[in-house]
Amino acid sequence: KAGVTQTPRYLIKTRGQQVTLSCSPISGHRSVSWYQQTPGQGLQFLFEYFSETQRNKGNFPGRFSGRQFSNSRSEMNVSTLELGDSALYLCASQPSNYGYTFGSGTRLTVV
Amino acid sequence: GENVEQHPSTLSVQEGDSAVIKCTYSDSASNYFPWYKQELGKGPQLIIDIRSNVGEKKDQRIAVTLNKTAKHFSLHITETQPEDSAVYFCAASTQSNSGYALNFGKGTSLLVTP
């Protein structure tokens, strides 16, 4: 059974640019959540999508947005990139209320 | 909001010894407490979880205990092996039919030496 797939694995962007990250959940999982992981702040919740609707949202600025498609695949977008946005972005999927399965993440570096 | 504290930040044990990682949480409404293991270059992997209606749960060499009154929960790994070396994260959340968001501790870097 395929796991959670995140693309790309690595990304380098310049300040002020925007970026789109992609996540394909495990087949049958309808919920997709996104987390940001940094050495300083640790793992922080960005948002959760279920059946194409944002169900929960973390405390991040409006530059961070996401969406979910009818096949449960999800994308997150960060606009006007700042140096502090450099992080590992993790996507997780889950069936109903069981535990998350995380992908390996997208490592974003902003220069 | 929920605040999760995790200790210690680093832990070094000899192979075969036990390892214990402790976490405290602040929100009494939290009812779901998972533990994740993260190896280098990989995403966190769920290793065990416990819900607030249970005081202890075991899975082979791993056990988790929960004290709701004191708002703390712990991970116990017995007979540690070098492959247990990784960063471990605790988390707390309020699960509902509207999903949940995990509040993570800062992590414990566990090193098991042969």
Image (cartoon, coloured by chain):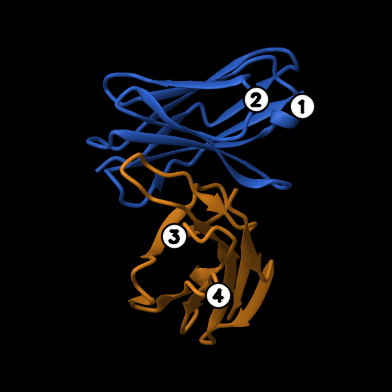
Tag in front: 4 or 2: 4
Q: Quadrant of residue B64?
A: bottom left
| Amino acid, disc 4 | Ala
Q: What element carries label 2?
A: loop
| Amino acid, disc 1 | Leu
Q: What element carries label 3?
A: strand
Q: Where is residue B112 in the image (x, y as percent from the top left)?
A: 59, 76
Q: Mark 3 points at which residue?
A: B34
Position of residue B96 relative to residue A35, above or below, is: below
Q: In which quarter of the image is residue B88?
A: bottom right
Tag in front: 1 or 3: 3
Position of residue A93 relative to residue B40, above or below, is: above
- On residue B70, the disc is 4
Q: How far apart are marks 2 and 3 (CA)?
A: 27 Å
On the picture, is A30 further left or further right than B37? left
- Same-chain check, marks 1 and 3: no
Say whether marks 2 and 1 touch (CB < 8 Å).
no
Q: Closest to the observer: B113 or B99?
A: B99
Q: Distance between the residues labelled 1 and 3?
A: 31 Å
Count of labels in the image:
4
Q: Distance between the residues labelled 4 and 3?
A: 17 Å
Q: How far apart are marks 1 and 4 (CA)?
A: 40 Å
